[in-house]
Amino acid sequence: MRLTVLALAATVVGTALVPAAFGQERAPAPATAPVAGPIIQMFQWPWDSVASECTNFLGPKKFGAVQVSPPQEHIVLPEAGHPWYQDYQPVSYQLETRRGNREQFANMVKTCNDAGVQIYADAVVNHMAGSDGDHPGSAGSEFTKYDYPGTYSDADFHDCRRDIANYNDKWEVRNCELVGLADLKTESDWVRQSEIKYLNDLISLGVSGFRVDGVKHMPPEDIGAIFGGLNAVPGTGQKPYVFQEVIADSTTTAGEYAGNGDVTEFAYQGKVSDAFKNGSLEQLDGFTDEMPLPADQAVVFIDNHDTQRSSPTLTYKDGTAYDLAVGFELAYPYGTPQLISSFAFDNSEQGPPAEADGTTKPASCDDPAWVCEHRRPIIAGMTGFHNAVQGAPLTDWWDNGGGQIAFGRQDKGFVAINREGGELSQTFQTSLPAGSYCDVMSGELSNGACTGQTVEVGEDGKFTATVAANSGVALHAGAKLG
């Protein structure tokens, strides 16, 4: 199958096991509170590399959680060049992928938890691999479509064994096949139990949450039953945090799934990415009033692994415009921000940097093959801003009617962004206490001094700054001198 189809398929995965009696419905599980720091999707990063990055950068910079690629055994597609989407076609629930084995995965989870960074696993629960196994899976399992020995057999899949033809037909969207992927009967006890068992296995290793892929291809009650069977995260007494990927349309709304946990808000991505792409930032004044989901249930993003390839309004390839959009996402009070750290690609099917056998090479931010968006100065600096302004409402909005905006988060922070071609020279009214602040878009507070620009806020809460074209200034209480 071609990636144009499978890229969509990557929106439909996630599996878990329900340790309840057959036929027993479970109420949706209560989720843990969203993390204080942002979620960073380390797309296709190997387990050992994620562990190292948690210790060396993500923990010290106070990122809240890492979303890792699906950890279950997947199909292997050497003839297609080991594309990225093979990882979204499960073969079994063994923890053996091109990114590492079970021992490496468990060590990564522990290392990141020790660094103060939670691990969220990308969960594929809607389907299994969509073609016969011309090669064994990543753990060596032999299989054919609709027969995955030790996991599922023919009776565990829906009878509509053709691609979805009519996306206006909700029954078809939930029962037919997404680009040929074997569509699981998530309403069946055996499938639910198998998926819950898998997800609880990950929880037993210290995984704190899940991003569930392609949720609109499953009924909300099926997802709720699976979530209801999940155990508490060890040492916390709380259920794992879950957020559901729902690409809403006229047939399916994100709100249908809000009773099960948080939901991705694709409308946000379109609005903010367009504004920063076109430089029309004034339209963002109060724009979240138009968002379908309430702020406390929305997971927002500028791009993810799908939109990078299928609707690349803004990606790492857009340079500072992209960085500023992510900075806005981290500064504006709506939703839980999800960021991405990805690999460079020239075509939409390309997999991560790999050895000849398809095993993913170690990720290194010194290697241009790995983009490491999270280490870019604006994005890294605005992560600290996000953490410092939690709970503070939007205040002091200003715009010039075009591509220059500024706003505050009460007395916790203030940001100004210039997406125009000329300088922005302005005296800004803020609610910040008087003092000297480090501009976290140009540097950080280190050993009592600013490594970038220092900005003086007066007793009246005002400061004057010249913001260069296509740049910004951000001040927050956690980067105040003295």
Image (tube, rainbow, N blue to C red):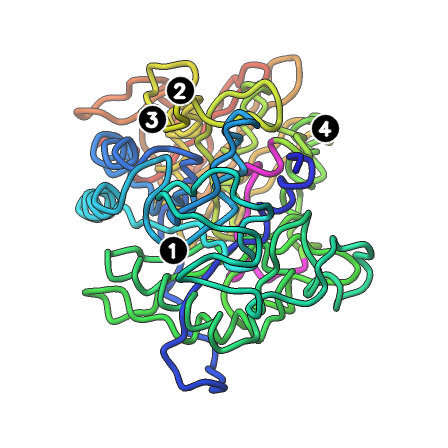
Q: Residues within 10 Å of mark 4 (few under 14, many from 20)?
A: some
Q: Nearer the viewer, residue 480 or 72?
A: 72
Residue 302, how many percent across, how many down?
57, 37
Residue 121, how many percent across, how many down?
39, 51
Q: Earlier in the sequence, mark 2 or mark 4?
A: 2
- Per the image, label 4 sits on a secondary structure element best described as loop
Q: Residue shown at 41%/54% (left/top)? A: 92
Mark 1–mark 3 distance (CA, rounded to whole Å): 48 Å
Residue 457, how many percent across, how many down?
39, 31
Q: Can residue 480 be seen in this snapshot?
A: no
Left of 84 or right of it: where is 398? Answer: right
The residue under label 3 is 438
Q: Can residue 290 be seen in this snapshot?
A: yes
Q: Residue shown at 30%/35% (left/top)? A: 50
Q: Nearer the viewer, residue 221 or 35?
A: 221
- Per the image, label 3 sits on a secondary structure element best described as strand
Which segment did they paint magenta?
292-308
Q: Residues within 10 Å of mark 2 (few under 14, many from 20)?
A: few
Q: Residue shown at 21%/64% (left/top)? A: 234
Quadrant in the rendering for residue 357: top left
Q: Earlier in the sequence, mark 4 or mark 1?
A: 1
Amino acid type for the residue under numbered disc 4: Gly
Q: Is residue 145 above or below residue 115?
A: below
The residue under label 4 is 402
Mark 3 and mark 4 in contact (Cβ < 8 Å)?
no
The residue under label 1 is 93
Amino acid type for the residue under numbered disc 3: Cys
Quadrant in the rendering for residue 205: bottom left
The residue under label 2 is 356
Mark 2 and mark 1 in contact (Cβ < 8 Å)?
no
